[in-house]
Image: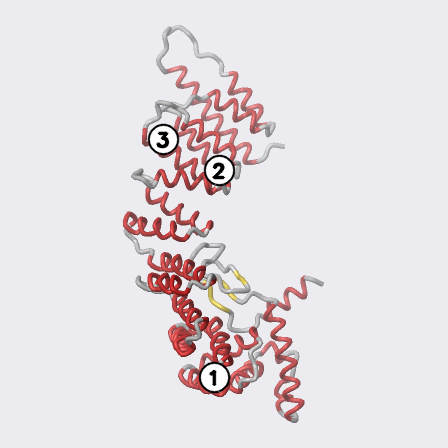
Amino acid sequence: MPTESTFLLAGLFLLLAAAGWALGRFGERDEEDVAPPLNIDYLKGLNFLLNEQTDQALEHFLAMVRVDDKTIETHFALGSLFRRRGEVDRAIRIHQNIIARPDLAAEQRDQALFSLAKDYLHAGLLDRAEKLFVRLAQGSRYQVQALESLCSIYEQEKEWEKAIDAGQRLEVLGGRSLALQIAHYYCELAEAAAAANDYPAARQFVKKAQSGRPRTLRGTLTRAHIARESDEHKTALRLYHRIIDKHTYLIAEALPEIVATYESEGSTAGLDRALRSMLDKNPEMSSLVAYTAIVNNIGGIPIVDACVEQYMLDEPTLAEFVDLHRMADSDAGAHDAALEKVRGALSKLASATPRYQCQECGFSSQRLLWQCPSCRNWETQRPASRVQFDTVLQHSITSR
């Protein structure tokens, strides 16, 4: 049976046929007494369409309505409709048919090229889309849209230098700042250079990332990582603590590095003092320290273990299953063993649930993604601060 979308297309074809008939009836004709012929192509095309033979219907439509100044917008509308319906191959054929017209006006050619580029992008043919957008970015009325699309393509292809160039041109033409976005492009280059042990190049990329406003703390994290890998531990620790002071949510990234840095120097006592000082300034960070410690299996540090224990005592959902307050009254050995067992269970639960969530679209992931894969926004993910018991319980119920 024909679907609703088939009838929608049939209605469009009916309007197109009427337009074609009107052009034949009222347009210029050599002999006024000749009646307009019955459009057999239209009747065949409509029959194909109602029988869901869209390929044959499209062939008849393209034969029925020629591309000229009076029908070109109809072709654009049909191509857009096919793209929205996911029939990109048909949209591509229509827009290529428009471009093939030798006497096409320059503005209409740009419109057809822009539509074809969007078809390619929708189909995942990034190389073809890129070529057309590069052409359109050279002075057409679609410059801004083309540069926006090029930024998106270069992000997907991880061609960060090209993305920087397109972003900087877009800033000039679009009249808006892309400082945060471009800073992340430089950070991507810095991280790639650091991974290749090219620390001088990585430092230069970070410097460029930090030269604009607003700054991204990703650049500071990368600087701290480079300092730690270069055995500049004091610099690394200073940067990690600066990150936590400015944005406490990044403790999930910074704390494991702080612990590893102190441990590499054999200074667990210094680590305990530094963390106590940090918590004295920001007591509300206790639960974040505890959750990060649980997720990353950080233990053996008195202040961290105290945060974890308090976290477990304050967790209302956990109290439904384990009487931790009674455990606290037992002897020290039994108390420590019970807490360690609960802590291990919490660590497993935390590893089975998403740790980060995008504040814009809600996309969840196990690790920090600087660009959300769903909404494509930069630096919108935030870490969880507690074990997601509700998610775990719901999963266990639905899997029974």
Residue receiving disc 3: 109
Q: Secondary structure at mark 1?
A: helix
- Residue 35 image-quadrant placement: top left
Instruction: Please indicate whether residue 357 sits to the left or right of residue 30 in the image.
Output: right
Residue receiving disc 2: 83
Q: Secondary structure at mark 2?
A: helix
Residue receiving disc 1: 271
User: Which residue appears at 41% of the width and 23% of the height?
Assistant: 67
Question: Do residues under tags 2 and 1 come within 8 Å of each other at their CB atoms?
Answer: no
Marks 2 and 1, how far apart at CA: 58 Å
Residue 158 in the image: state x and y as whole percent: 45, 52
Which badge, 3 or 1, comes first in the chain's sequence?
Answer: 3
Residue 299 in the image: state x and y as whole percent: 56, 81
Q: Is residue 152 above or below residue 205?
A: above
Q: Is residue 382 above or below residue 47?
A: below
Residue 45 in the image: state x and y as whole percent: 54, 23
Which badge, 2 or 1, comes first in the chain's sequence?
Answer: 2
Between 283 and 398, which is closer to the camera in this rendering?
A: 283
- Residue 300 image-quadrant placement: bottom right
- Residue 141 image-quadrant placement: top left
Task: Name the front one of labels 2 and 1.
Answer: 1
Q: Residues within 10 Å of mark 2 (few under 14, many from 20)?
A: many
User: Which residue appears at 28% of the width and 47% of the height?
Assistant: 173
Q: Amino acid at mark 3?
A: Arg
Instruction: Please indicate whether residue 397 sits to the left or right of residue 106 in the image.
Output: right
Residue 277 in the image: state x and y as whole percent: 42, 85
Q: Amino acid at mark 2?
A: Arg
Quadrant location of the N terminus? top right
Instruction: Please indicate whether residue 134 sits to the left or right of residue 265 in the image.
Output: left
Quadrant location of the C terminus? bottom right
Q: Residues within 10 Å of mark 1 (few under 14, many from 20)?
A: many
Question: Do residues under tags 3 and 1 come within 8 Å of each other at their CB atoms?
Answer: no
